[in-house]
Image (tube, rainbow, N blue to C red):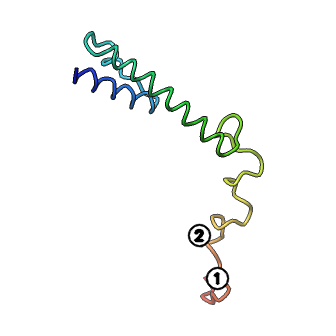
Amino acid sequence: MDDALVAYNSGRVDGAAGLRDPRIAEDPEVGADYRVGLLDGRIAAFHLMAEIRKVLGVEGSLFEQPEGSLFEQPEGSLFEQPEGRLFEHPDDVSGA
């Protein structure tokens, strides 16, 4: 019984992570428990992503970057300053 619970939990964790261990899945003793856990993990991950989309008000993929996204770097952003500097301080008189 303990082996079955461990296999189920391993399957659930792997399913939530989008992984599958074929060695455990094909094991004659605990493979069925692993596969059930795998399916439960995938379903849990699906529901989690659906809730995240709902909270964020996103339809479709969360990984698409629509025009005007917060992740786009505007021209003159902190990361594009000349001479490798992150920002220019108004009191900076070093001349560098």
Q: Is residue 86 above or below residue 10?
A: below
Q: Does dot 2 land on a helix, a strand or a loop? A: helix
Q: Which quadrant is the C terminus positioned in?
A: bottom right
Q: Residues within 10 Å of mark 2 (few under 14, many from 20)?
A: few
* Cα–Cα gap, marks 2 and 1: 14 Å
Give the camera-side residue of 25 and 52.
Answer: 52
Identify residue for label 1.
89
State yes or no: discs 2 and 1 in contact (Cβ < 8 Å).
no
Q: Is residue 92 above or below residue 20?
A: below
User: Image point 22% across, 24% down: which residue?
Assistant: 2
Q: Residues within 10 Å of mark 1 (few under 14, many from 20)?
A: few
Q: Residue furthest left?
A: 2
What x and y, as percent, mark residue 76? Answer: 72, 66
Q: Residue furthest top?
A: 28
Give the camera-side residue of 51 and 69.
Answer: 51
Q: Mark 2 vs mark 1: which is more N-terminal?
A: 2
Disc ID at residue 84:
2
Q: Does dot 1 land on a helix, a strand or a loop? A: loop
User: Image point 64% across, 40% down: which residue?
Assistant: 53
The three-letter code of the residue at mark 1 reads His
Q: Is residue 91 above or below residue 23?
A: below
Residue 74: name its quadrant: bottom right
